[in-house]
Image: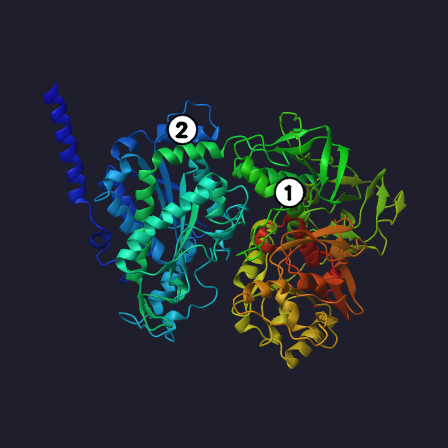
Amino acid sequence: MRRHIFTLLSFFIISTSFFAQNIQSPDEFLGYELGTRFTNHYRVVDYYQYLAKASNMVQLEEYGKTNEHRLLQVAYVSSPENLENLESIRSNHIANTKISSSENTADKAIVWLSYNVHGNESSGTEASMKTIYELITSKKAWLQNTVVIMDPCINPDGRDRYVNWYNQVASFPYNSNQKAKEHDEPWPGGRPNHYLFDLNRDWAWATQVETRQRLKVYNKWLPHIHVDFHEQGINEPYYFAPAAEPFHEVITDWQRDFQTQIGKNHAGYFDKEGWLYFTRERFDLFYPSYGDTYPTFNGAIGMTYEQAGHGRAGLGIINDEGDLLTLKDRIAHHHTTGLSTVEISSKNADKLNSEFKKYFSNKDFTYKSYVLEGNKYRIKKLMRLLDRHEIQYDLTSNTVKGFDYQSGQQTSRKVKNALLVSTNQAKANMVKVLFEPKAKLSDSVTYDITAWSIPYAYGLNTIASKTIVPYDKITGFDIPLNVPQKTNAVAYVTDWKNVADAAFLGQLLQAGVRVRFAEKTFTVNGKTFDRGSLIITKGDNKNVANFHDTVFDIAIENYIQLSSITSGFADSGVDLGSPDIKEIKMPKIAVISGEATSSLAFGELWYFFEQELKFPVTNINSDSFSSGTLNSFNILILPDGSYRDIFDSKQLKTLKNWISRGGKVIAMKGALRTFDGKEGFGISRKQPEDNGGKNEIISYAKSERQNISNYITGAIFKTKVDTTHPLAFGYDDSYFTLKLGSDAYDYLKGGYTVAYSEDNKVVSGFAGYKAVKNIKNTLVFGEHRIGNGSMIYMVDNPMFRAFWENGKLFFANAVFMVNNNSFEL
């Protein structure tokens, strides 16, 4: 027996030694030393696939592809025995969350390392190859009780955009002068994904294909530790945990403490090498959609590690202190913290498991249930989001008491088939974070927005209850289709309430179907149709082949409920032939992109038209824009940006002439400054209140905190709405806006102030007291007529990060409804 055991042990030692001796390092496999050039994504994929074949300590899982069809994958790295029992390890681990009912025997540390969420923060992916190689060769002991999950590149499209550009322009071996072209990355840069979204702000909202696919794998595991590897400016030392305040209140004392333990472990290695670092500054744990906060709110120790470099550094650059920063340096630092994280996790595997289980124990939150009613399309969209996060929900038909989001008061009302999301589930902490009316903010100096509550973002009538509301088990929540039979109908009518209606309209127009809309309400066959309702008449579409089938097919695709009308004579209100039933002309849309614009703001619009509306637009580079460009379009969209270099006095005159002939400009956020105070444009910024000529004394040490009194860092305000204006069709008389800055504009002079802040009460989030004073009685959305055309002003951005669902119809109205029938171009 002893001989048999000895033989097996000898075989194990020989076989593992064989694997280790024959595994190529990244340098050997790639044919160059890491840090001497950037590695294209396909070669990174090749190396990981090679390791999975060459080593019995690596398994790969392909979890999707990007918009540009690049592979997304994770590597499971552990001992051969652990990998053979990987599913058992996973199920035992998940049992600690109470999601699974299996018996809990979890004893392994689960560590997830994520690299290159920002494509031009490129040292991460390079470091991942060095890290995985060392884990399976010289650090195997840590893997006996640890499973490491490595995502070598979250954002391959952005990374290859940066790497391909750099390889095209760089000197050989490299030019370290900051003025060199290789340190001046062109718009839009490699940071965002294909649609120019910041994937490190998308974890909670899951709008992008990379996020949606990754969440399926992430929520399957819910690791103990998650590290998001980043880069920052070239002059900054390395940053690692612990994080800065504010911490969200759901974060436990253990999560805080173990961050500090991890940081001290890193510090030991950095001190030995003489590398500078900082902690507890800048990077907080509050906004829920980061690669550190989302894991943290799901039970992990979520951390951001920041290395100097970013898109400026290239292979080597002299920083402002005169020191040479190389890609080799950057790789070494990320490699060190990656290994250090695995090391301390392995040493604390038992504690990680016990504390992880405690995180998912019952929570005594103030609000225990959230009951949501309203637009069925937005509720259905919210349900899809909850599914992606594996948050449970039901329906309820009960009398509910609690905080009413719409009024801001306590209320009690009977609901029927309302969506119910309670904290009586494993994802209780995420429910609280995403749904609570106002998150508790321990420090007003933050890194991102401070308000995001889903009921406001989705525009749903919601009550937050302090009790667990009884539920009715969901057997199906479907949007009913009402497609009439082919009859002698003179027209088909549908409401205008959400983005699905806009997508329906856009597809009809592309199919050559003529569509009208109602500027006034009317009643037919006992049903009242509000302003904005779409009307498709048979008489307008005599030349459309298969008219009925075309309309019905597009309606079914978009879950549109159609009503048939057999007479143009209304029971009340306007008849179908009324001048207030206006035709919607086909928009020909140009969107400015390029150096003048915010890449993120442009990306939000690009994504909306292409993925949500499926409606064609032409993206025009700001450097190529000229007055002649306008002749091919009837709508010009200016995303947030700075356009003063494009629209000088001569170009403004040309633009005004184009508008007067029926053109329409939609100016958003920073673009409004281009027209501020300019004659004939009707828009002017509101000046802050005079402090009486007194000069405020500013403390150098406290200047940051004193200055935030002038800022609004993503706060929610309740605004009033003129529902009679086409820009507001589909809305009630109030709207919750997410205000992202302190810019304030007076009500339009001679124009239509459609949505506006009549008071300055903050509903949720932080807003500096000086900024708040200035937004009282100011514009949010409005229209100013110039001849036959229009300027549409959007002070706040309703398209922000594609998650503020309740704002998107304002933008669709601006495109399709406002002054649309006047196009003469």
Left or right: 165 as drawn, with respect to 782? left
Q: CA distance from mark 2 to mark 1?
A: 39 Å
Q: Say which residue appears at 58% left-offset and 38% top-offset.
A: 431
Helix, strand or loop for disc 2: helix
Q: Residue at x 71, y 36 (%)?
A: 402
Q: Residues within 10 Å of mark 2 (few under 14, many from 20)?
A: many
Q: Is residue 756 visible?
A: yes
- Of 625 and 491, nearer the camera is 625
State which quarter of the image contains the N terminus: top left
Residue 88, image x, y percentages = 36, 27
Mark sitting earlier along the chain (2/1): 2
Disc 2 designates what residue? 91
Q: The C terminus lies in which quarter of the figure? A: bottom right
Q: Is residue 86 above or below residue 434?
A: above
Query: Residue 631 falls in which quadrant of the image?
Result: bottom right
In the picture of the structure, the residue carrying the numbered disc 1 is: 558
- Residue 746 in the image: state x and y as whole percent: 75, 67
- 489 above or below 780? above
Q: Identify the amino acid type marked 1.
A: Asn
Q: Quadrant of residue 617?
A: bottom right
x and y, in percent, of residue 498 in the image: 69, 47
In-image side of 617 versus 270 (left or right): right
**Which is nearer the eye, 318 or 653?**
318
Q: Residue furthest bottom?
A: 650
Q: Secondary structure at mark 1?
A: loop
Residue located 33% across and 70% down the image: 317
Q: Amino acid at mark 2?
A: Ser
Mark 2 or mark 1, which is nearer to you? 2
Residue 327: percent from the left, percent from the top?
Answer: 31, 62
Looking at the picture, tell me which residue is in the foreground, 503 or 711.
711
